[in-house]
Image (cartoon, rainbow, N blue to C red):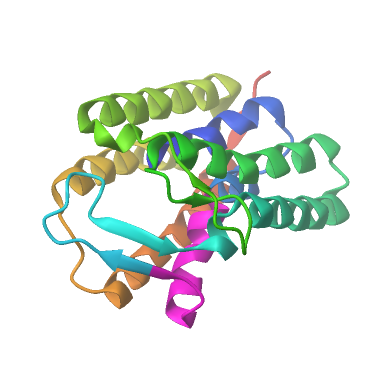
């Protein structure tokens, strides 16, 4: 799952309208924000599969600290707790916790059985939607369109930044996903991790244009 996680962040604004889109977007992306950091530190491992099928050019051999259900609960509690401590906005904290957990649930749907439940356990699950590239693409784009529509109905642009910043955000996500379908395998694991670190820019971008939009519901 890729743009589906962004869709969750966008749609979250409907449930927690007083929360900034920045943390709302960071929540469903959190596992993927942590993953490249843990890869570079050597805490988690991935194997590149040259010539692998679409969406299966990576073999996730070990990523329990970023992607296990157990740790996603921990990260969700920490993130939501920190947000609550700073804002005292209960709805925002609850949505952030659910957003962090949504990453594991959505990844289970698309991944082959490689999603860990606990840090040290041997049980891994996955429903394998990635085995059908066409269905995966349809589901991902449907989720993105739904998320963009919900956020667009929930907020209204106050100026050009709010209007074009949001539109450019959605368009770039659609283009990045399309390019990823044909990109093939990355050259090295460090290159993969370094490129994935760019995901940290998206919650900042979301925070920026959301400050230039007003809630209308």
| Residue 111 in which image quadrant | top left
Q: Residue at x 64, y 25 (%)?
A: 14
Q: Is residue 136 left or right of residue 121?
A: left
Q: Is residue 163 something that shows in the picture?
A: no
Q: Is residue 101 left or right of residue 195?
A: right
Q: Is residue 207 left or right of residue 93?
A: left
Residues in magenta?
29-45
Above or below, 12 relative to 211: above
On the rendered image, what quadrant is the N terminus found in? top left
Main secondary structure type of the part rendered in magenta: helix
Q: Residue at x 29, y 24 (%)?
A: 138
In the depicted view, which residue is nearer to us: 106 or 143?
A: 106
Residue 141 picture location, percent across and down: 33, 28
Number of callouts? 0
Q: Residue at x 68, y 18 (%)?
A: 217
In the depicted view, which residue is nearer to us: 167 or 200?
A: 200
Q: Is residue 174 left or right of residue 196?
A: left
Q: Is residue 118 something that shows in the picture?
A: yes
Residue 61 picture location, percent across and down: 40, 63
Instruction: State the residue lying farthest toward the front.
Output: 122
Above or below, 145 relative to 160: above
Magenta stretch: includes residue 86: no
Instruction: State the residue lying farthest toward the bottom.
Output: 41
Residue 10 picture location, percent across and down: 53, 34
Q: Residue at x 55, y 51 (%)?
A: 123
Residue 182 picture location, percent across and down: 13, 46
In the depicted view, which residue is nearer to us: 26 or 74?
A: 74
């Amino acid at each position: 799952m890729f743009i589906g996680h962004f869709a969750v962040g966008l749609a979250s604004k409907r449930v927690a309208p007083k929360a900034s889109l920045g943390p709302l977007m960071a929540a469903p992306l959190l596992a993927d924000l942590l993953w490249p950091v843990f890869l570079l530190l050597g805490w988690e491992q991935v194997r590149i599969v040259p010539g692998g099928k679409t969406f299966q050019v990576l073999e996730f051999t070990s990523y329990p600290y970023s992607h296990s259900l157990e740790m996603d609960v921990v990260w969700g509690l920490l993130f939501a707790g920190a947000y609550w401590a700073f804002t005292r906005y209960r709805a925002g904290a609850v949505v952030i916790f659910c957003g962090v957990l949504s990453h594991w649930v959505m990844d289970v749907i698309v991944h082959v059985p490689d999603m860990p439940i606990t840090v040290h356990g041997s049980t891994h699950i996955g429903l394998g939607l990635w085995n059908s590239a066409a269905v995966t693409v349809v589901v991902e784009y449907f989720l993105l369109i739904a998320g963009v529509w919900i956020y667009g109905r929930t907020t209204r642009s106050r100026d050009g930044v709010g209007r074009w910043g949001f539109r450019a955000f959605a368009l770039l996500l659609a283009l990045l996903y399309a390019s990823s379908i044909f990109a093939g395998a990355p050259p090295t694991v460090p290159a993969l991790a370094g490129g994935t670190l760019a995901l940290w820019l998206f919650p900042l971008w979301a925070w920026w244009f959301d400050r230039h939009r007003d809630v209308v519901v």
